Image (cartoon, helix red, strand yellow):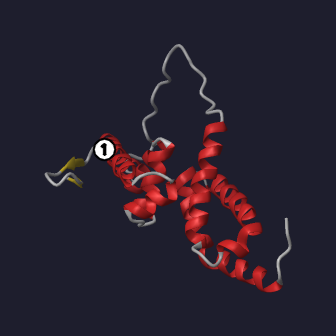
Amino acid sequence: MRTGTGREEADFEAFVAARGPRLLRVAWLLTGDTYLAEDLLQTVLAKVWPKWRRICAENPEAYIRKALVNTHASWWRRRWRGEIPHDRMPEKAEPADPFAAVDLERSLAHVVRGLPPRQRAVVVLRYFEGLSVEETAQTLGCRPGTVKSQASKALDTLRSALMTAQPGLTEGSDGYAWHV
């Protein structure tokens, strides 16, 4: 790791202090796990620091977001999922608190984590980070049409899964899920 000038270090520290929570949120949305998100962000920041002088003049947040997506994708490709086949399905346990299943935010986070990595990245960047289609395409290194199609597939999956997970939801004529 290179050592920078005191000014570069101060700029990097100020950037991380200001933008770190938002970048950690992106990492959490990608990984779905607090500790993995912290590891992902730390890994990316360690990779970015040697290049800080070059990227700080451009758009460092966009650069780091893209690095988060790419690093997470490489982790996801390499990671063993830990699935062990069984000859019979386990019994489903009834939730102890029937109101716990109504927590829409948890359901959404769970369903987002179940999306394929590319769709998850599109959802995180488009809808949680508020990037435009073009910015998302640039971050992911693909065409805007790919972002639109992946977003459409992801939203269909999310809508369907949430309708199943939340028995009190119904789909309105506008395509949104509503509580009844």
Residue at left offset 41%, top offset 56%: 105
| Residue 56 in picture, x, y percent from top left | 65, 76
Percent from the top left, x then y, of residue 169? 25, 49
Find residue 10 and report its image quarter: bottom right
Q: Is residue 165 visible?
A: no
> In the image, residue 102 lies at what x, y percent?
36, 51
Return the residue nearer the eye: 85 or 31. 31
Q: Is residue 134 above or below residue 57?
A: above
Q: Extreme bottom residue here? A: 7
Q: Quadrant of residue 75?
A: top right
Residue topped by disc 1: 156
Q: Residues within 10 Å of mark 1 (few under 14, many from 20)?
A: few
Residue at image point 41% right, 49% down: 107
Q: State the residue at coordinates (16%, 55%).
A: 174
The correct choice, above or below, for 22 with respect to 106 in the image is below
In the picture as drawn, the residue positioned furthest to the top comes out as: 87
Residue 143 x, y percent position in the rendering = 41, 52
Image point 57% across, 59% down: which residue? 66
Q: Considering only vertical position in the picture, is 175 above or below 93?
A: below
**Which amino acid, mark 1?**
Asp
Whether residue 112 is visible here, answered yes or no, is yes
Q: Nearer the viewer, residue 126 or 128?
A: 126
**What secondary structure is found at the residue carrying circle 1?**
helix
In the foreground, 32 or 93: 32
Q: Residue furthest left?
A: 173
Q: Quadrant of the N terminus?
A: bottom right
Marks counted in the figure total: 1
